[in-house]
Image (cartoon, rainbow, N blue to C red):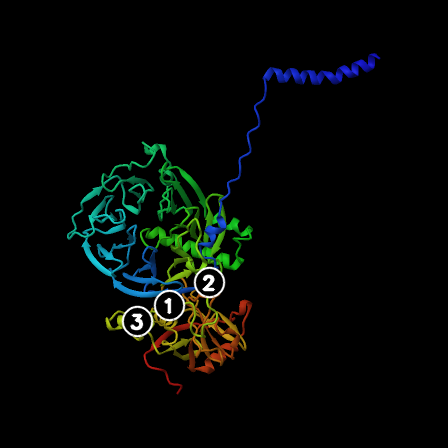
Amino acid sequence: NMGRESEEAAKKKPQEEEEESDDDYGPTPAPAPKKKRKVLEFESVFLDHLPSAEMYEKSFMHVGNVTHVRCLPANGYILTASNDGQLKFWKKGKSEVEFVKRFYAHVGPITDMAASPDGAWLCTVGAKDGVLNVFDVVNFDMVNMIKLGFSPSCTEIVSKAGAHKMVVACGSRDGPEIRLFDCKAAGATPIRTMNSHKVHVTRMRYHAGLDAVISTDRKGLIEFWNPETLETPKGVTWKYKSDTDLYELAKHKTTALSIDVSPDGSLFASLCADKFVRVWRCGTGKLFKKIDETAAAAHEGQNDALLKLDPIDFGRRMAVEKDLDSTLEKDLDTAAPNSVFDQSSKLLLFPTHVGIKVMNLVENKIVRIIGKPEASERFLGLSLFQASVSKRGASEGEVDPTLVATSFNKPRFFLFTKRAPDQSSEEGAGRDVFNERPPKELALAGVGTTGSKAVHGKGAVIHTSMGDMTIRLYGEECPKTVENFCTHSRNDYYNGTIIHRVIKSFMIQMGDPLGDGTGGQSIWGGEFEDEFHRNLRHDRPFTVSMANAGPGTNGSQFFITTVPTPWLDNKHTVFGRVVKGMDVVQRIEQTKTGKDDKPNEEIKIVNIKVLHEVPSAK
């Protein structure tokens, strides 16, 4: 019995000690309630009012690279600007876009472009010519030109819709001041000058709800100020900037490439030079979201089914990212990327290496990627043409959401809609509209452009270490490809390069300055689009065609076929035919090759002479 009692006592003892221990510390608090996961109501409705097609439906041309785009849904216009100083007006129809008018607005690139909240007015500035231009959008008219007397860095219209006096603010590359002008007044005397920044201002955006301007400078400092008083606006909740997160960029030694305010006025977003997308609350100045788009995050995204790219495609896109970062570092004031909110202010669209991401800001997740298959484009500038989202909803017939995008170093802007590209169009036509071919009005004005015959040669002689090959060029059928080839040839780009790939009964390939098939770029930098023509096929030997790594990836490399190769039609741009020196092509074809089909003995291009007459076969 004693043994049994001691066993029972031993069992009770820990329990008693436990009870005593609990008493010593008092009652424990109730467990914290589990946080409810935030869910965006009506997400499917908001997504239904955005473009859904993965590929762009159409693209239209400028002569120079397109740098800015602005949609004005209030009056149905799209405005595009390019680095040759041209501004174009386009009218958005139910399912189509029509060209309206062109202005030669500036000498040199258009540095920035801004529209009034009601879409009635537009202003542009050029850093090279130091000019501010003001346009009446509805009447397609330029109503004022102000010679600023300084080199502007950015501009913004800072008046509410319908205001009696339309005021425009201009930052300067020459100093930290922001000068405010009356749009309709003659002369370049500012009505006010804002001096809160210490270095030159790079971006500005007007917040109509707060009647405030959000501006940022080269050191990343962000200022909120009223355009009348130049003081902190009344609608914000903070008294001191130290109570906000507006020092976030300066703290991380980075700068904002864009500022975009949500339609409901609650948020503003910035794409930043350190590859983060940051979103702040306008009322408190507190940081709301910080989205990682760095190279490390891109590599991690290769493990995500939604973001994953083919390894070769991924490597090429990351190389383009490096080129883009280098360009933005040299010139922060032009051709920078930007984000855009949808009309609900719950979704944020921003361009990345993988395409245009659509982020649900409530649930913090990517819900759609637009343009992912467009491997040859790195989209930058965005503007959204969206139908009004009413509580009752809109009928399908009323909704034609269109996302307009620019692309890095491309003379085109791209339209994403709910429709896939038209596959039924006649061969030779297609989604890439050649509205600048031939630009007769530019030719008459004496401006050299892509479509001008003066730029193109009609033939060329390729002098190689094994002999000469004379080719005929087809500048009318594929003007951009021939311009690229002729300009490279005149600039001695091909001199000393080797014929780096030879495959018997197929082709000989050349034009790579690196000599291994991985190098070369176009005369515009980067790559350019294909120019397929129904009359130019790979239907015979001695066809001269562009080498590429997929659609729209033409650079400097080209090849000459030695047999008919019809499987290459509509995949590679035919731009010439060998008319003399076929024996040289055949001798090169017979050379012994080693690894990667590279000739064992170097065959060099000495130079290429451009001919201005169609070469004869004799």
Q: How many other residues sit within 10 Å of disc 1, few (<14), some (14-19) or many (≥20)? A: some
Q: How many other residues sit within 10 Å of disc 2, few (<14), some (14-19) or many (≥20)? A: some
Q: How many other residues sit within 10 Å of disc 3, few (<14), some (14-19) or many (≥20)? A: some
As displayed, is residue 243 above or below residue 220? Answer: above
Q: Which residue is mark 1?
A: 493
Tell me the element at label 3: loop
Q: Earlier in the sequence, mark 2 or mark 1?
A: 2
Taking 426 as reference, is 210 left or right?
left
Could you tell me residue 431's position as x and y percent?
42, 67
As displayed, is residue 300 above or below residue 18? Answer: below
Residue contact between numbered discs 2 and 3, judged by CB atoms under 8 Å: no
Mark 3 or 1, closer to the camera: 3
Q: From mark 2 to mark 1, how far is it between C-alphas?
A: 41 Å
Could you tell me residue 591's position as x and y percent?
52, 76
Residue contact between numbered discs 2 and 1, judged by CB atoms under 8 Å: no
Nearer to me, 454 or 500: 454
Q: Amino acid at mark 3?
A: Pro
Q: Amino acid at mark 2?
A: Arg
**Residue at 34% across, 42% down:** 220
- Specify whether residue 32 is in view: yes
Q: Which residue is mark 3?
A: 439
Question: Which image quadrant for residue 456?
Answer: bottom left
Q: Earlier in the sequence, mark 2 or mark 3?
A: 2
Q: From mark 2 to mark 3, how far is it between C-alphas?
A: 29 Å
Q: Residue furthest bottom?
A: 618
- Specify whether residue 523 is in view: no
As displayed, is residue 402 above or below residue 266? Answer: below
Residue contact between numbered discs 3 and 1, judged by CB atoms under 8 Å: no
- Quarter of the image for the C terminus: give it: bottom left
Question: Which image quadrant for residue 83?
Answer: bottom left
Q: Amino acid at mark 1?
A: Tyr
Nearer to me, 65 or 260: 260
